Amino acid sequence: MRICFAVFSLRRILTLVIIPTLLVSLAIASLAASSRRALSGWLIAIDAGHGGHDHGAWFPDHGILEKEITLQLATKLGNVFAESGAAVVLVRDDDTFVELSERANRANKIRARMFLSLHVNRYPGDPNCCGAQTFYQNDAIEGKYLATLIQEHLRRIDPENHRQPLPANFQVLRESQMPAALIEIGFATNARDRRLMMDNKYREGVVYAIRDAVIAYSRSTPSAL
């Protein structure tokens, strides 16, 4: 009886504990592998806004210097995209100034399949304006869909953000020959957003929100492939 009981108990342990744990581990490993391959075959150009003599939004009393924030984000985002299998080109990878006309042109020359331009917003006329905001070129169907996905994912990390993607006629969007979105991660003129942008957790959240949106885009738009 003791032997049979021992065998029965071992089987129950295998059935109730060990086997489900192994299955969960295998599922997690499969998801991780899938994430590493999610952007395989994609060449993505990332534009860190401003640079060099062009500081962008600059609020030294609050530690806000747009050109530094965008470069840090672009570098981190490029690494995260690479981890998901994408090839990445940074329009600038140091504190240098790149003309607006050259930013989209660099992406066009390498035939990137996506162009993302990172910025910090500001609106001195209304310090209550807040929240990350995405833009797309007027009448650009793929760009609108990309910007919409990114906006949705950005709202998930900031429940107070109720912004919607907006059409625009920015030069970097207008001259891009691939799906493109311009992303403002917050308003330097808003106290709440300044605190968020100086928080590394928020910046990391922005990076992963963009990555997840881009993966969703790549999976749902075969026409863009």
Image (cartoon, rainbow, N blue to C red):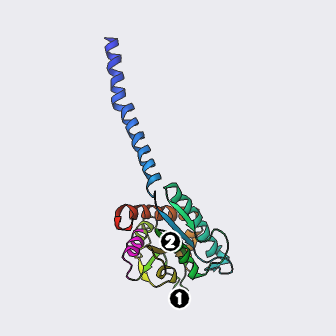
Q: Earlier in the sequence, mark 1 or mark 2?
A: 2
Q: Compared to 5, does 212 lie above or below?
A: below
Image position, residue 64 (x, y; %)? 63, 74
Going by the image, does 143 lie left or right of 127? left
What's the magenta region? 139-149
- Is residue 44 within the magenta segment? no
The structure residue drawn at horizontal position 46% and vertical position 74%, both measured from the top left corner, is 181
Image position, residue 120 (x, y; %)? 56, 76
Q: Nearer the viewer, mark 1 or mark 2?
A: 2
Residue 122 in view here:
yes
Q: Label 2's element?
A: strand
Classed neighbour count for the residue bearing mark 1: other residues with Cα under 10 Å, few (<14), some (14–19), many (≥20): few
Q: Compared to 98, does 72 lie above or below?
A: above
Q: Label 1's element?
A: loop
Q: Compared to 170, does 42 lie above or below?
A: above
Going by the image, does 122 lie left or right of 64? left
Asked whether the residues under the numbered discs 1 and 2 touch, taking CB atoms below 8 Å apart as contact, a structural biologist would say no
Q: CA distance from mark 1 to mark 2?
A: 27 Å
Front in this rendered view, residue 107 or 157: 107
Query: Exactly how many numbered labels are in the figure?
Result: 2
Quadrant, the C terminus: bottom left
Q: What amino acid is found at the position of numbered circle 1 in the picture?
A: Gly
Front in this rendered view, residue 68 or 115: 115
Please tell me in which quadrant of the rendered image residue 203 appears.
Answer: bottom right
Quadrant, the N terminus: top left
The residue wearing badge 2 is 116
Residue 125: image tag: 1
Front in this rendered view, residue 171 or 61: 171
Q: What amino acid is found at the position of numbered circle 2 in the picture?
A: Leu
Front in this rendered view, residue 56 or 178: 178
The structure residue drawn at horizontal position 40% and vertical position 68%, both measured from the top left corner, is 149
